[in-house]
Image (cartoon, grey):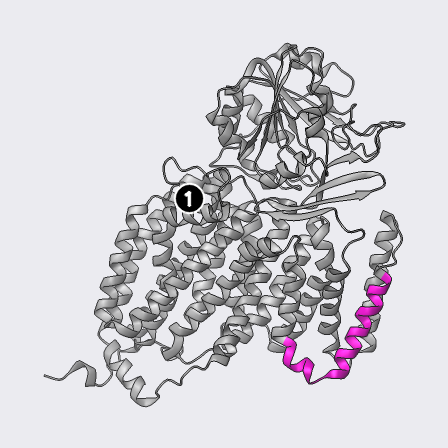
């Protein structure tokens, strides 16, 4: 009998080799589709428990990237030390263990511990809910490719083309969830479809493993004898790490910024990640659709966009156009880094090591953005740092060899920064200076066009310079938490509190008028009108979801009971620190402030409010879990029979009145609405307009309110109300 290890390779007929390649391709495609569908799916399932913060997604990405390392390492060890038959048996056993976790769901009874580490609790929740299925899926990309490399299929000696198929599946799933699955199926039905796909995957993995068993020993022995794999040195490993870290970090920076301004929703998560994945599809091939020269040019454009916007991104909001520009920058930068990564790939025998190192680099990007940056920096400093990392990694060597280009680029940046630090005040002046700065940079780059490296040097120097110069006067307080960035600064006699990119409260710094609420809460505002209504009982109980700086507390009357709900401990610290703001210390020093997500806290309580104010927005991000039928049921349980729900819905991007009216319709409530502008001649500095919707079971109460000046009754909108399982924030975008 001939020993299998010394047998000649068995060459299958071409008619059998092509179907085998198709089975491997379909297996890896399905696996990747499930891998990237489960990420936004499970994040959506847990979002109501974690307050809807943008950091939920970056922390989730850290979990997924970390488990990916484990999956790739497991695949590497399995391929290296276990015979083919054992590999298949072990992998199918893990698949069988993962079936226990189906269908996907949040562990029964799980709630976050108030005051505990939310990043750590988020990681543990993902581990308990989806850890084993995700680990099995994450190992498939390198494992299936390694199996194919031992087969006699077409291009078995260079199976990286399967990675493009894997990323194509990832891309389709990422876009399908927010555009098709979420709006048309909802989370639960999508979870059932995903579970069915996971069961099917087990059969396809079995088929792939059986196809390669006969040829694997001979192929492996022949390949090892013909061309022993070259050792991998530390310099090469460091290059792989860096080229994987940079696009991962850039992707998370872009996602965080867009989430702060537009909301933490699956589409916001999926679009940057989809572009990131698409760059793998386009670059991990011997025949790229975009030439290397074009990729180099687009990379410089992307770096310029990211650098030019980096300072503005740290402190200001931007329009959806800004989000598009950021996504383009991510796409161009990731394409350059991933193309360089593909060119630096090892031979097929070292494939699993390559993927392990690549996954570590991606996870380091997640670690930096989700845990290290919030702990180390009090602003979004990771944005300019990412620009610097991109430049140094991709262009560091060439720039050192071109000192003239570097000098010219730094000169351009210095001139632009000199103009920026002496810009006049005012919105129109601000816009004009943006055009002037852009013109200076473009003209400088035009005159230095024969020195192409001057371009990335200039934009990188701009990013570094703007981060160092800062933004006007030094803040009194600057800090970050899991839920966002917090800044307190003085301007024009007012002390301003900014969360993300939106001013969430202000107080006059002089003695006279210090306790008069400002901004959305000034004495003539709809919010003030609701908590000072003469029809309220003398012993009214008022609840406020979203503390801000506690300005509403100064409308409290003797005999009333006020309760505040705030998810972010840092906001509570700011509002109760007399050296920062005095609304809470002077007006309601004894009012309880309940820490935690208001929905979860209210569910555990047994109070009855005469007025319950919902004002829980971070920047312009919408906490959808506070605007669903399940949330409404909790509010109504805590509302007195004649009580009112007051929703503050001022927003730059979303019209929340139709979704609220649908909730009211299903709950049997009536709605009144007021869009208030700042009245001419109002003598309250810092007064802002606002949009407020009020609901009540008492139709007469709403009719009386609608008869007042500025208020209107709102007819119930058609369509389905939002639920935890099915909410379409895209439909609320203002047109």
- Residue 280 vs 433, above or below: the answer is below
Asked whether, in this view, residue 666 is left or right of residue 413, the answer is left
Q: Is residue 196 magenta?
A: no
- Residue 135 vs 585, above or below: the answer is below
Q: Quadrant of the rendered structure where residue 648 is?
A: top right
At x 73%, y 23%, the residue is: 528
User: Magenta segment, principal secondary structure?
Assistant: helix
Asked whether, in this view, residue 234 is left or right of residue 334, the answer is left
- Residue 659 vs 87, above or below: the answer is above
Q: Is residue 401 magenta?
A: yes
Q: Is residue 712 visible?
A: no
Image position, residue 583 (x, y; %): 72, 29
Q: Residues within 10 Å of mark 1 (few under 14, many from 20)?
A: many
Query: Which of 490/100 is in front?
Result: 490
Report the number of discs: 1
Image position, residue 367 (x, y; %): 51, 59
Extreme residue toward the left, this view: 1
**Quarter of the figure with the N terminus:** bottom left
Residue segment shown in magenta: 395-419
Asked whether, in this view, residue 175 is left or right of residue 149, the answer is right
At x 76%, y 57%, the residue is: 470
* Mark 1 element type: helix
Query: Which of 371/15 is in front?
Result: 371
Asked whether, in this view, residue 56 is left or right of residue 426, the answer is left
Q: Is residue 696 visible?
A: yes
Image position, residue 296 (x, y; %): 64, 75
Image position, residue 266 (x, y; %): 53, 47
Query: Which of 382/649 is in front?
Result: 382
Extreme residue toward the bottom, this view: 226
Which residue is label 1 attached to? 190
- Residue 70 vs 522, above or below: the answer is below
């Amino acid at each position: 009998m001939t020993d299998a290890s010394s047998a000649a390779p068995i060459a299958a007929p071409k008619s059998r080799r092509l179907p085998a390649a198709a089975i491997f391709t379909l297996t890896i495609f399905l696996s990747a589709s499930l891998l990237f569908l489960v990420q936004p799916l499970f994040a959506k399932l847990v979002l109501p428990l974690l307050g809807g913060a943008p950091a939920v997604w970056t922390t989730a990405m850290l979990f997924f990237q970390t488990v990916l390392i484990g999956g790739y390492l497991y695949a590497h060890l399995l391929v290296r030390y276990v015979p083919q038959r054992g590999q298949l048996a072990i992998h199918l056993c893990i698949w069988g263990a993962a079936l226990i976790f189906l269908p996907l769901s949040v562990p029964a009874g799980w709630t976050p511990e108030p005051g505990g580490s939310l990043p750590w609790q988020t990681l543990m929740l993902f581990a308990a809910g989806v850890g084993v299925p995700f680990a099995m899926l994450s190992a498939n990309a390198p494992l299936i490719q390694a199996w194919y490399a031992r087969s006699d299929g077409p291009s078995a000696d260079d199976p990286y083309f399967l990675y493009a198929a894997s990323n194509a599946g990832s891309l389709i799933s990422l876009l399908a969830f927010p555009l098709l699955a979420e709006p048309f199926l909802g989370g639960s039905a999508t979870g059932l479809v995903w579970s069915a796909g996971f069961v099917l995957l087990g059969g396809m993995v079995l088929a792939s493993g059986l196809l390669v068993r006969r040829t694997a020993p001979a192929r492996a022995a022949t390949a090892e004898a013909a061309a022993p794999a070259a050792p991998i040195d530390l310099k090469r490993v460091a290059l792989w790490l860096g080229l994987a870290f940079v696009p991962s970090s850039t992707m998370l920076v872009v996602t965080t910024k867009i989430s702060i301004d537009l909301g933490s929703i699956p589409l916001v998560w999926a679009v940057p990640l989809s572009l990131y994945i698409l760059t793998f599809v386009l670059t991990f091939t011997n025949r790229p659709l975009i030439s290397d020269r074009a990729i180099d040019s687009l990379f410089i454009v992307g770096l310029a966009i990211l650098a030019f916007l980096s300072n503005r991104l740290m402190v200001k909001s931007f329009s959806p156009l800004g989000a598009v520009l950021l996504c383009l920058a991510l796409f161009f930068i990731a394409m350059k880094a991933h193309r360089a990564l593909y060119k630096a790939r090892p031979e097929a025998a070292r494939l699993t090591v390559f993927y392990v190192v690549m996954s570590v680099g991606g996870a380091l990007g997640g670690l930096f953005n989700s845990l290290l940056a919030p702990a180390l920096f009090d602003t979004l400093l990771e944005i300019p740092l990412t620009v610097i990392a991109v430049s140094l990694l991709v262009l560091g060597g060439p720039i050192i060899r071109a000192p003239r280009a570097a000098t010219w680029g730094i000169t351009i940046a210095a001139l632009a920064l000199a103009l920026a630090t002496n810009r006049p005040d005012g919105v129109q002046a601000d816009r004009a200076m943006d055009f002037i700065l852009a013109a200076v940079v473009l003209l400088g780059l035009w005159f230095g066009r024969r020195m192409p490296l001057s371009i990335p040097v200039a934009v990188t120097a701009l990013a570094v310079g703007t981060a160092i110069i800062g933004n006007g006067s030094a803040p009194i307080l600057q800090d970050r938490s899991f839920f966002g960035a917090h800044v307190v600064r003085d301007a024009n006699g007012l002390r301003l509190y900014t969360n993300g990119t939106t001013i969430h409260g202000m107080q006059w710094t002089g003695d006279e008028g210090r306790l008069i609420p400002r901004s959305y809460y000034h004495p003539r505002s709809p919010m003030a009108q609701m908590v000072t209504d003469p029809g309220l009982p003398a012993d009214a109980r008022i609840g406020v979801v979203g503390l801000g700086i506690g300005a509403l507390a100064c409308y409290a009357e003797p005999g009333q009971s006020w309760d505040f709900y705030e998810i972010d401990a840092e906001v509570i610290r700011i509002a109760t620190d007399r050296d920062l703001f005095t609304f809470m210390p002077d007006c309601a020093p004894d009012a309880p402030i309940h820490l935690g997500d208001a929905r979860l806290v209210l569910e555990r309580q047994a109070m009855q409010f005469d007025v319950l104010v919902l004002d829980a927005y971070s920047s312009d991000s919408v906490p959808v879990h506070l605007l669903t039928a399940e949330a409404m049921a909790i509010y109504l349980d805590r509302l007195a029979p004649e009580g009112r729900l007051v929703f503050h819905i001022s927003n730059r991007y979303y019209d929340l009145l139709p979704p609220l009216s649908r909730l009211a319709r299903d709950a049997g409530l009536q709605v009144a609405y007021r869009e208030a502008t700042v009245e001419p001649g109002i003598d309250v500095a810092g007064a802002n307009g606002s949009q407020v919707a009020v609901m009540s079971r008492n139709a007469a109460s709403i009719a009386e309110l609608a008869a007042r000046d500025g208020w209107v009754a709102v007819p119930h909108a058609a369509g389905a109300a939002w639920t935890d399982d099915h909410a379409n924030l895209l439909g609320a975008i203002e047109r």
